[in-house]
Amino acid sequence: MPSTVIASFHYNVETNVLTIVFVSGIVYHYKNVPEKIYKNMKNSTSKGIYFNRNIKDKFEFEKVP
């Protein structure tokens, strides 16, 4: 199901970095994210709700310029 908040996301298994592209075009890298969190997000029916409950404010992040 498409998200109204998240345009796309990608997980790098080698670095444990979750990259999230928001519909606004802003991109963030979330660091040290367990692969299980990524897989659960991938399988969730609402990416935005899953992000807010399980990723936002829980992992170190940086905005990609």
Image: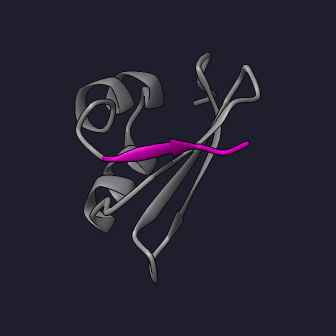
Measuring from the top left, give residue 8's x and y in whole percent.
Answer: 66, 42
Q: Quadrant of residue 53?
A: top left
The residue depicted at 71 percent of the width and 23 percent of the height is: 23
Residue at point 76%, 28% (across, down): 25
Tell me how many marks there are. Answer: 0
Image quarter where the C terminus lies is top right
Q: Nearer the viewer, residue 42 or 57?
A: 57
Task: Judge left or right: residue 33 versus residue 24.
Answer: left
Give the color scheme: rainbow, by chain, secondary structure or one colour.
one colour
Comparing 7 with 43, the one in front is 7
Query: Up-down: is 30 above or below 2?
Result: below
Left or right of 34 on screen, residue 51: right
Residue situated in front as seen by the camera: 29 or 53 = 29
Does 2 sit left or right of 15 as displayed?
Answer: right
Question: Quick one: 26 or 6, which is closer to the camera?
Answer: 26
- On-image quarter of the N terminus: top right
Among the 4 quarters of the image, the one containing residue 26: top right
Residue 28 lies in the magenta stretch: no
| Residue 44 x %, y % | 38, 38
Name the residue at 45% across, 49% down.
Answer: 42
Residue 50 image position (x, y, % from top left): 33, 31
| Relative vertical location of residue 62 with respect to residue 5 in this rendering, above or below | below
- Asked if the magenta segment contains residue 62, the reply would be yes
Segment tinted magenta in the rendering? 60-65
**Residue 12, percent from left and from top:** 52, 71
Q: Residue at x 51, y 44 (%)?
A: 62
